[in-house]
Amino acid sequence: MQLLNTILIGITAGSIYSLMAIAFVLVWRSTRVINFAQAGMALLSTYFGYEAVTRIGSFWIALPIAMLGGAIFSALVEVILMRVLVKHSSSGPIAAVAPIIATLGLLGLIRSVIAMIWGGQDLRILPPVSNNGFTVNGEVLVFSPLKLLILITTLILMALLTLLFQRTNLGLSFRASAYAPEIARLSGVRVDLIRTLGWALAGAAGAVAGVFQTVNGNGNFSPDSIEFSLLLVSGFIAAVIGGLDSLLGAVIGGMFLGLTISFILMYVSSGLFFIAPFVVLLLVLFIRPQGIIGVKVGRRA
Amino acid sequence: MHKLKPRVHFALFLIFGFILFLAGNRVDELRVYQGASIAVFVIAISSLILLTGYSGQVSLGHGALMAIGAYSATLARNEFQIPIIVTFFIAVLAAAVGGALLGAAAARLSGPYLAGTTLALAIGLPSLANQFSILGGEQGLLFDVGFPPLGLGEDFTQYKWFFWIAALAALISTWLLSNILSSRYGRNWRAGRSNEVAAQICGINTGRSKILAFTISAGIAGLAGALLSMTIGTVSPSAFPLALSFALLTGAVLSGVSTLSGVMIGAVTLVAIPEIADVVAHRIGSSENITTNLPGFIVSALLIVTVLFVPNGPVEQHRAREARKAAKKRL
């Protein structure tokens, strides 16, 4: 029973990490930048969701609103910040690290602006269904209707994303601008627009991850909540495990990370909550630096 | 670029130290305390400049390395009653060992991977303090360097003593760093940063040189960590939050990551920001939410603006402009 619990918790957490990893991968594929502000965007979207829930009262209307808000904000960041960055800081000793520093600055900026608007105290989003575990054979599982719902919603979103990428012209443009921007431009794809759209999709995925991470925890969130730092690190690690370039890899990486952490917490020590992801990341980088699904070119982006 | 002779260099540091000494006697307690903070930031930022500007690696985990230094100094002091000056060396050594381990991983990574790994460390490491009871958990441990020696006079305050120790450490470490950076190792790092393949052709073991950069940088960060907990009086996980690593990065970018001589700009700015924010908040008479978050806002905004418009720092920017002017004249 403990084993089953561990696996189910791991998969639920893993699906949230996967969403976050997908956000990282989408941004990486469109602009070759790791967006460390992703957690800040997810946090902001969660606040959008909170506003919608308190005004409208329905979680299922608030979630799309949070996604839309996250998408618009993310697209704005790409247009306002990243395009200027590429123009100004493309040479000199700092060129390689400028995007990293800029997105980190953005993370700090988003957090402090949120704290200015909503204050530093904990806010709360109530989960749409109960987070009390199912009862099987008289035993109470940790797995709850809420976790099931998170899992199903995540799977549906991933299926939609796969459809978008594999079956539509827009998806083809996405893939073309990621792999050969020059040629894509030659054949009439508006690469800049596609890049912005890629950021917008990432913002939406991050929004879902943020809202789910919040309700899957105790429902509380604040500008400094450690949950979001954890989401940032976990999503990044999941994306790295998956090879950064592949959406499927991001999902596998997220699930792998979720399960690994869940097993470490259950069978080794529950106090390793924050250091476990770091250890997993180091092991992955030493054993298989190109990721589970990744081309063998080494990590020299 | 003109080069100063080492002896002139050393004399300059002595003169600068003497000016600091005179200034320290003329200002009030708060300024002396801020002076000590500036000295700590000078050390921490210069360690990041060495790493990011010279060897081209980003670290978001320098807050964690500072924590290693601070904790090991405190443990050495509290558990074994080691003389205070030795504990600073222990801080340097312990953090350097941590940095060497991290550097060994880092040498295989670059850019965003390294940033993400060190970010994970910065978030994960401070929480370890709650795991081992010897580290004192959330409240942390007391770190007491003791009263200033009686020979310095009666009105020699505790903060002035902190300032003396920190400023002396800053002078020594900056002097050492500037020498290392203009030595063979400094050239190796810059070569590896500019073009790794070319550097390898010249016979530089770029992997080993990166690990060395990480080790030295971590050791200096450890010293800064020990000094920081000296000025606070305690060492606890909350003294080394992610925001500290970000602030250091901002300081390094403001100073111009590739110029050690700009390090004062970053350090002074970081210490001045809370005060400026206070004044601004008072002026516009804002709510408490805005007042408490204004410093963080300013740090982040400065970071973004600098990276967007003066990516290589004010000193480097000025130098580049002068060089362009000179080139025009020659034509």
Image (tube, coloured by chain):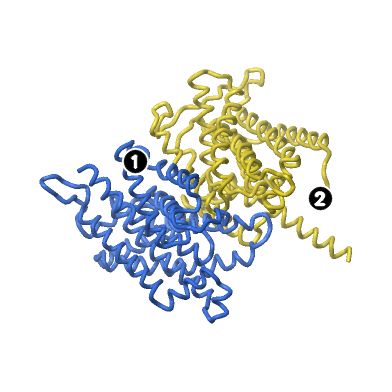
Chain colours: A blue, B yellow
Name which residue type carries label 1: Ile
Of A20 and A102, which appears nearest the observer?
Answer: A20
Q: Residues within 10 Å of mark 1 (few under 14, many from 20)?
A: some
- Furthest toward the bottom, the residue is A188
Letter of the chain that mark 2 sits on in the rendering: B
In the rendered image, which quarter contains the C terminus of chain A?
A: bottom right
Quarter assignment of residue B85 = top right
Do labels 1 and 2 touch, CB within 8 Å? no
The answer to whether any part of residue A139 appears in the image is yes
Cα–Cα span, label 1 and label 2: 55 Å
- The residue wearing badge 1 is A264
Q: Mark on residue B1? A: 2
Q: Position of residue B131 (x, y in %)?
A: 38, 33
Q: Residue at x 58, y 36 (%)?
A: B100
Name which residue type carries label 2: Met
- Asked if badge 1 and badge 2 are on a common chain, one would say no
Q: Residues within 10 Å of mark 2 (few under 14, many from 20)?
A: few
Residue B81 vs residue A129: left or right?
A: right
The answer to whether any part of residue B288 appears in the image is no
